[in-house]
Image (cartoon, helix red, strand yellow):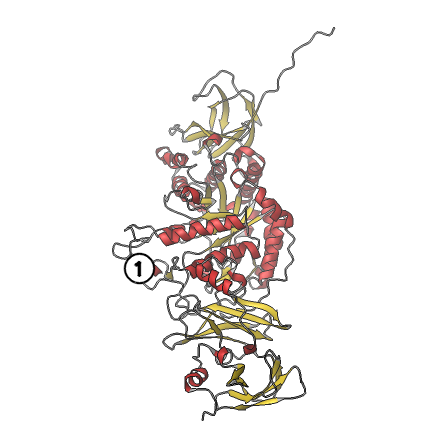
Amino acid sequence: MKHSLLSDDDYYPLIEARHCDPFRILGVRQVDGRWVARVLRPDVQQVAIILDSNPSKKHPLSPADGNGLFECNLADFKADMSYQLELTGHDGSTWRERDPYAFPPVLGEIDIYLFNEGTHYDIYKKLGAHVKVIDDVPGVHFAVWAPSAQRVSVVGDFNNWDGRIHPMRKLTPSGVWEIFLPGVHEGSHYKFEIRSGVGDVFLKTDPYAFFAQHGTSTGCIVFDLSRYQWNDQAWIEKRPKIDPYNSPMSIYEVHIGSWQRITEDGDRSLSYLELGDRLIPYVKEMGFTHIELMPVMEHPFDGSWGYQVVNYYAPTSRFGNPDEFRNFVDRCHQEGIGVILDWVPGHFPKDAHGLARFDGTCLFEHEDPRLGEHQDWGTLIFNYGRNEVKNFLIGNALYWMDEFHIDGLRVDAVASMLYLDYSRKEGEWIPNCFGGRENLEAISFLKRCNEVAYERFPGVAMIAEESTSYPGVSHPTYNDGLGFGFKWNMGWMNDSLRYISKEPIHRRYHQSDVTFSMLYAFQEHFILVLSHDEVVHGKGSLIDKMPGDYWQKFANCRMFLSWMWAHPGKKLIFQGIEFGQFAEWKHAFSLDWHLTQSPANDGLRRLVQHLNWLYTHEPSFYECDDSYEGFEWIDFNDADNTVWSFMRKSRTGATIVFIVNATPVVREGYRVGVNATGFYEEILNSDSSTYGGSNVGNYGGVHACENWSWQNQPHSIEINLPPLSVVAFKHIPPVPQLANKTRK
């Protein structure tokens, strides 16, 4: 029976856990000139208030009903007095805690205004769960955006997951709910219990959680990010001073769960700390400049490879905690290795505990499935026209750069974001306001995200996985570009893989597959990629794509990778490609590291190592990477021999001559035009016995034949061209001869 002084309009919504403003009636409040204490705790049998000014005196609260509501009058209470609650559980145990309803709002008007405007780029410091001390009281501040919810509560292991105990304050009209819970500490598990506008009650993850469980366990974990001490100051200070377009970038793409596993310990994955112990020395030894990690953001399903993210702000707990992931990045930087993360702002999964219909409505996504759902992937599309959603995503991009010192983001599936009709038939999509197929809201979001990222963190790289011919992907926004720093060169990848899979006898008819890329090579800032997508789903591994017998497969692979490193553009290869992994990549299994004991596999690995060394030490490989000034064809028409040749040049004019022979035929006395006299040092021969080849070569180099013009060049060199190979010759200018002088 009700004995509360509350009106029915407040009482029943409160005890039924649907009240939207519990702070108005809970705690110590002045009512008709007197102070009334009111506590809703259905998990206890007795409540008393103890004023800090008189700790020896207890003020018992009377049960107002059988639903856990306790009340009393406090005659000696004055405004702003601090107090504690003494609670007695149903088992007779007694403890004390501070009353959450005694604390004022933490979020200010400016925070709310900027968030609703979509420009609160430090929003991750405000929403979510944050360890705080307020008025000398330690606890955790929780905040979440759920504008259509009727009621939101924090539930966790600190309140027996009971949504009646800690209903939050709604900061109207922002749609943000918040509460400070004294006594809650780091390591506590929590979720948000949401009552929708139609009365449905469900649990949701914290969109801004820093740490979360994975798999079937989906709780969030309070984590304090303020503790870690970075040791990469030298790297961070140096990064903005590097010109990314005229610097080497050789990227090793890694899936943490499968790069290497501990077979002697149940075939488990490496932890972040173990990854640092093993991956960093390997990458440094191999000469890669960057590591790109497939998504590390928390995701329930291993088989998504991380591309169906639920907790965008939480590095997955599969491999350790956030500080341990920070340690990995920190150690990479100390060893001179950059770290790039895969980032997935294009879609998110429908998991019930995730972002889908977060407050009972389509909050992060569109209501209309023609706008809000990816049919191919069974996922949902962000509503890029909603300010708070854009803020969530832009804030997330900045979060990884700010809190984890990440050097760049590879943005997944950009094409799916750019086009409203992406993978849709006629009638399955809605045109934009001009009747076109471009997703104007997504385009605006991408531009702004790139602008803010480069503004706040100079020296980072924003990289687009964009598979169409959309113009200006890597052009600045002030030139009507999307503002990315780089774009994956999917055209080169598709053409080159199609070419290399053909038998050498047929390649003469398809030479344009390898030369066509130079028609557009400098329209964007490109990264040449051989990613995970090319070694799964029946496509076979890279080495297995190669035609011929065992020896020819490796020779083809050595030739192909050498051509890739010689071609303008930054480089990226997926784990296992560097040593000739034969099996298709499987996310639940380790790479076949035992293959590196084979001479052929280890030879391929050493070639990649040497390619990286040349790439980082010879400016001709990377300077003028986005300009015709750095590239010149010598001959791309020798399809009869399936040979093509070209020069790469540095800004100072240093020249390297490359010749590719895509057949298993040795061509002795092959003449190549060159533009200068002198000695041409053979700095690369993919057929060298060091790499497992037949060792056809040129004894260290050749001298140019002066005035023997060839292929529209004033001079030429005559070389032995090995089978299925790339050879490279560095021009060494002749030393000026000193004139003879007669001694006086």
In-image side of 89 versus 636 (left or right): right
| Residue 409 in view (yes/no) | no
Nearest to the observer: residue 49 or residue 254: 49
Q: Nearer the viewer, residue 184 or 25?
A: 25
Neighbour tally class for label 1: few under 14, some 14-19, many 20 plus, Cα within 10 Å: some
Residue type indicated by callout 1: Arg
Circle 1: element type: helix
Task: Tell me if residue 254 comes above or below residue 741 in the rendering.
Answer: below
Residue at point 40% right, 54% down? Answer: 537
Which residue lies most toward the front here? 33
In the rendered image, the vertical position of residue 79 relative to residue 245, given as above or below:
below
432 to 17, vertically: above or below: above
Q: Nearer the viewer, residue 621 or 666?
A: 621
Residue drawn where x is 37% and y is 66% of the image: 362
Q: Position of residue 254 (x, y in %)?
A: 52, 52
Residue that sits furthest to the right in the current view: 744
Residue 21 percent across, percent down from the top left? 46, 77
Q: Quadrant of residue 129?
A: bottom right
Please provide percent x and percent y for residue 468.
37, 46
Residue at which label 1 appears: 370
Indicate the quadrant containing the N terminus: top left, top right, bottom left or bottom right: bottom left
Q: Which quadrant is home to the C terminus?
A: top right
Residue 597 point in image, percent of width and height: 57, 47
Q: Visible in this render: residue 197?
A: yes
Q: Residue at x 30, y 55 (%)?
A: 424
